Image: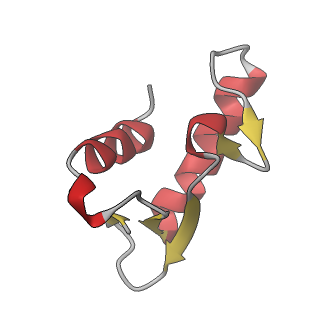
């Protein structure tokens, strides 16, 4: 699994479920770009991930938002 996908998984695991269902993942610009590249590479290489407009299907119900000010941040909303 790519570093970015691992970071997203960790952020989702630590999300406080009492606040409701997570609706978005906010990624820094570089992480957002790396996520698209990682998923495209895994899909092309025949990996387990499939894509839905450049996102892993596991995150289809979540929006992925770009945060251009905090380029290395992963935040679940």
Relative to 59, residue 47 above or below:
above
Residue furthest to the bottom in view is 69
Q: Quadrant of the N terminus?
A: top left
Relative side of 46 to 73, left or right: right
Relative to 65, residue 21 above or below:
above
Q: Where in the figure is residue 8, as x and y percent of width and height?
A: 38, 47
Q: Which quadrant of the structure image shows residue 6?
A: top left
Q: Where in the figure is residue 2, as x and y percent of width and height?
A: 44, 32
The residue shown at (41%, 59%) is 22
Relative side of 26 to 10, left or right: right
Task: Name the colour scheme.
Answer: secondary structure
Which residue is nearer to you in this view: 75 or 62? 62
Q: Where in the figure is residue 72, as x and y percent of width and height?
A: 33, 66
Relative side of 58 to 30, left or right: right
Which residue is nearer to you in this view: 23 or 64? 23
Q: Quadrant of the C terminus?
A: bottom left
Relative to 45, residue 58 above or below:
below
The residue shown at (41%, 57%) is 21
The residue shown at (73%, 13%) is 46
Q: Which quadrant of the structure image shows residue 45?
A: top right
Count the labels in the image: 0
Q: Where in the figure is residue 48, as x and y percent of width and height?
A: 63, 16
């Amino acid at each position: 699994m790519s570093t970015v996908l691992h970071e997203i998984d960790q952020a989702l695991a630590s999300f406080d479920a009492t606040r409701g269902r997570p609706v978005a993942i906010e990624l820094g610009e570089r992480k957002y770009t790396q996520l698209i590249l990682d998923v495209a590479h895994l899909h092309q290489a025949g990996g387990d991930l499939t894509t839905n407009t450049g996102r892993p299907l596991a995150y289809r119900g979540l929006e992925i938002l770009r945060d251009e000010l905090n380029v290395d941040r992963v935040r679940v909303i």
